[in-house]
Amino acid sequence: MSIDAKTVKALRDKTGAGMMDCKKALLETGGNVEKAIDHLRKSGIAKAEKKGARTAKEGVVFSYIHQGGRLGVLVELNCETDFVAKTESFSELSHNLAMQIAATNPLAIQREDIDQMIIDHEKEIFTEQTKDSGKPKNVIEKIVEGRMEKFYAESCLLEQPFIKDSDRKVGDLITELVATLGENIIVNRFTRYAIGEASSNGQPH
């Protein structure tokens, strides 16, 4: 079955779990949000309290400079308390996120942040590429959907494979630390600067 992005985001907001974990939970529970919450809690990914609904107003703006000053990243990572913001594990996560952004140049933090015009444009290109294949319309739609998922995995920070461990998504790093520290953690925004390139910005979500 197909799970729409709004349902996935609603589950993420309720649990604080990662987008991919939420999608898997919804697929395994037939799209039932309440059952998906229970599934995530049993898996240890989400706790009883709704972390995603708790305010994350503390945190850090982390800076990372690479390639002899030719590439730099600023990333704002938020949490709930100043105590957590000062922990080594939070600092390590900030560093890993900045390195990820420097290496992959994501378009946005998550798919909901991508401008609809960009999404429509990508779908149009993928549809045009498969239009002359002679395949039935429903098959073409599935091919386009698959290519869009790959586009999101490449373009959205939280859905990208982690550069140090491709078996884990970047969002998983945050989910794991949320489970460890017991606080909501949010990537609020980022900016990537590279000499000779226009800066890329991940806007707040």
Image (cartoon, rainbow, N blue to C red):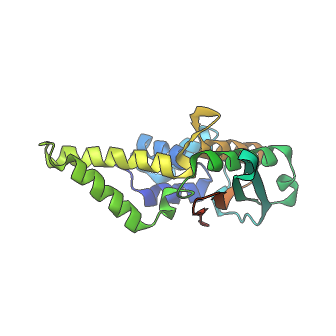
Quarter of the figure that contains the C terminus: bottom right
Nearest the eye: 31 or 203: 203
Q: Residue at x 60, y 49 (%)?
A: 17
Q: Residue at x 49, y 46 (%)?
A: 154
Camera-nearest residue between 53 and 175: 175
Residue 47 drawn above or below residue 14: above
Q: Residue at x 68, y 41 (%)?
A: 176
Please provide percent x and percent y for residue 189.
65, 63
Give residue 55's quadrant in the image.
Answer: bottom right
Image x and y of residue 93, in percent: 74, 46
Residue 138 drawn at (x, y percent)? 19, 47
Q: State left or right for residue 161 relative to residue 174.
A: left
Q: Residue at x 76, y 66 (%)?
A: 57
Is 113 in front, or is 40?
113
On the picture, is 61 further left or further right than 115?
right
Name the image quarter holding the N terminus.
Answer: top left
Whether residue 1 can be seen here: no
In the depicted structure, whether residue 203 falls above or below residue 103: below
Q: Which is nearer the eye, 173 or 165?
A: 165
Whole-percent x, y for residue 98 in the image: 70, 50
